[in-house]
Amino acid sequence: MILDTIKNKLKKYTNYTLYVGFSGGADSTCALYITNLYKEEFNYQVCAVHFNHNLRGQESDNEAIEAEKFCQKNNIPFKLVNLTFKDTTNLEAQARNARMSYWEKIAANKENTAVILGHHLDDNLENIFIRLGRGSGLSGLTSLREENTINNVLYIRLLLDVPRKEIENFLLSNNIDNWQNDSSNKEVKENKK
């Protein structure tokens, strides 16, 4: 089911250059793997972009190595972007801004160019609850969009209606079981409890 759903979405991007934000986690691995499956059928180019935020020492470096290995194994062009931060305050916002700046550099104002992100249904629900917790009014409760343009970059979220468990099951059914689990994500979830 997941393949049919995403294949129908990808048809729209025939003759595009599609950059896929590839952390190596289950969601971005799924988005990259499926996007790559249809590159010849829909005649688009695929390139995986991995951001090494250099915040978790060897763990960050190992994730970058594993991401590159996955791309080599699947014949996917791979770009590693190393990020560094001088100031340690609000690192999450700095990292997001650095990624957005990179996407703008390679994809803004370029015809038939887009960035695919691995956000999924669980992310969308979490986003709504976070906004509720911050006291957002109705206008602030809009969920993530499947497609939107920010600073002249087209962002696509192919998995927005797919739960994480279904993503993991799809990967396992395709003999992909070595996705990365960022330890800082686990820490954030534990701190929210």
Image (tube, rainbow, N blue to C red):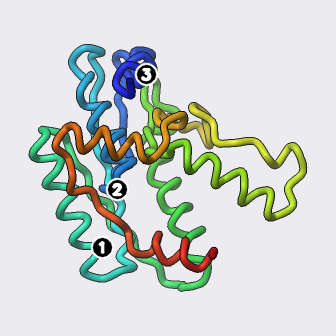
Q: Which residue lies at the image location 47% right of the left edge and 36% below the top edge?
A: 159
Could you tell which of marks 2 and 1 lies nearer the N-terminus? 2
**Which residue ends up furthest to the right in the rendered image?**
137
Q: Could you tell whether 84 is left or right of 150 in the image?
A: left
Q: Hey, which quadrant is residue 7 in on the image?
A: top left
- Asked whether the viewer can see residue 154, the reply is no
Q: Are marks 3 and 2 in contact (CB under 8 Å)?
A: no
Could you tell which of marks 3 and 1 lies nearer the N-terminus? 3
Residue 31 locus on image (x, y percent): 36, 39
Residue 26 locus on image (x, y percent): 34, 51
Q: Secondary structure at mark 1?
A: helix
Q: Please, is residue 88 above or below residue 158 in the view?
A: below
The disc at residue 5 is: 3
Q: Secondary structure at mark 2?
A: loop
Q: Which residue lies at the image location 30% right of the left edge and 56% below the top edge?
A: 24
Residue identified by numbered label 2: 25
Q: Secondary structure at mark 3?
A: helix
Q: CA distance from mark 3 to mark 2?
A: 21 Å
Amino acid carrying label 1: it is Ser
Residue identified by numbered label 1: 60
Q: Which residue lies at the image location 56% right of the left edge and 61% below the top edge?
A: 97
Residue 55 locus on image (x, y percent): 39, 79
